[in-house]
């Protein structure tokens, strides 16, 4: 079950919300540039670029990503963008929700990639339990990379809030991964199909 399904949204409503959230990011991008706050500009620009990836996939490969998946991804990046501006400092619960949602997106994408290679290869066949565990490990590994990046860029692009915040991030990243491992793998089945078609279309060496 994807985020839009949990909220009872239709595909049309999800598409309208995505457009609205993209306008918010464009506004933040303009505001950051006009006020020379390049941290805001960089964060909003990166987030906006991610939300435009589905349109790029449609144009380049003819793949129309499910509206629910697009909304799921867009919600994750807007939560982190708004949080990095001021909400993280004001509300601990906001940080936790943002990490659950973003971790669930990463878990879904990681699962789609893993499942694609599993179905593509005759030699790769794993138990569903291991598949679920691998989702959690993948998300935690991405979390480690991100936390290292945050410390490397601390004070320039992102704000580092300390070790306690890092531990909390890992806990809620794991929560998001477990949610997908138990209930959400079917949400990325269409993406698995797209990845498999792309692999089959590659010429053999």
Image: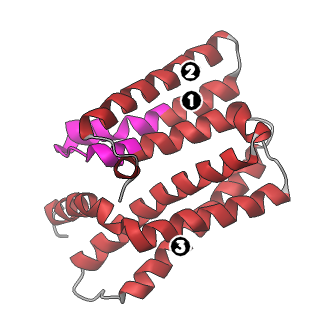
Whether residue 157 is visible to the viewer of this picture, yes or no, is no
Q: Residue at x 41, y 37 (%)?
A: 51
Quadrant location of the C terminus?
Answer: bottom left
x and y percentages locating residue 66 in the rendered image: 26, 47
* Other-residue count near label 3 (Cα within 10 Å), few / some / many at <14 / 14–19 / ≥20: many
Whether residue 117 is visible to the viewer of this picture, yes or no, is yes
Q: Residue at x 40, y 46 (%)?
A: 7
x and y percentages locating residue 83 in the rendered image: 66, 38
Which label lies toward us, 3 or 1? Answer: 3
* Side (left or right) of 36 relative to 120: right
Q: Which residue position is annotated with label 2?
A: 29
In the rendered image, residue 49 lying in the magenta stretch gets the answer: yes
In the rendered image, residue 63 lying in the magenta stretch gets the answer: yes
Q: Residue at x 39, y 52 (%)?
A: 6
x and y percentages locating residue 202 in the rendered image: 18, 62
Which label lies toward us, 2 or 3? Answer: 3
Q: Which residue position is annotated with label 1?
A: 44
Question: How far apart are the two marked residues, 1 and 2, measured between alpha carbons?
Answer: 5 Å
Q: Which residue position is annotated with label 3?
A: 136
x and y percentages locating residue 195 in the rendered image: 25, 61
| SS at mark 3 in the image | helix
Labels 1 & 2 near each other (Cβ < 8 A): yes
* Other-residue count near label 1 (Cα within 10 Å), few / some / many at <14 / 14–19 / ≥20: many
Magenta extent: 48-71
Q: First in sequence: mark 2 or mark 3? A: 2
Q: First in sequence: mark 3 or mark 1? A: 1
């Amino acid at each position: 079950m994807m985020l839009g399904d949990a909220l009872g949204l239709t595909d049309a409503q999800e598409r309208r919300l995505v457009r609205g959230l993209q306008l918010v990011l464009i506004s933040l991008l303009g505001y950051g540039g006009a006020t020379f706050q390049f941290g805001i500009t960089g964060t909003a620009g990166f987030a906006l670029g991610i939300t435009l990836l589905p349109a790029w996939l449609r144009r380049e490969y003819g793949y129309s990503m499910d509206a629910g998946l697009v909304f799921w991804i867009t919600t994750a990046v807007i939560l982190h963008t708004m949080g990095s501006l001021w909400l993280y400092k004001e509300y601990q619960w906001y940080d936790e929700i943002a990490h659950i949602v973003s971790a669930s997106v990463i878990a879904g994408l990681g699962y789609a990639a893993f499942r694609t290679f599993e179905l593509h290869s005759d030699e790769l066949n794993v138990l569903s339990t291991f598949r679920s565990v691998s989702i959690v490990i993948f998300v935690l590994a991405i979390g480690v990379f991100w936390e290292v990046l945050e410390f490397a860029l601390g004070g320039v692009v992102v704000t580092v809030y300390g070790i306690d915040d890092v531990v909390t991030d890992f806990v809620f990243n794991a929560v998001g991964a477990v949610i997908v491992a138990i209930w959400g793998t079917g949400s990325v089945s269409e993406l698995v199909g797209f990845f498999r078609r792309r692999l089959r279309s590659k010429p053999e060496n």
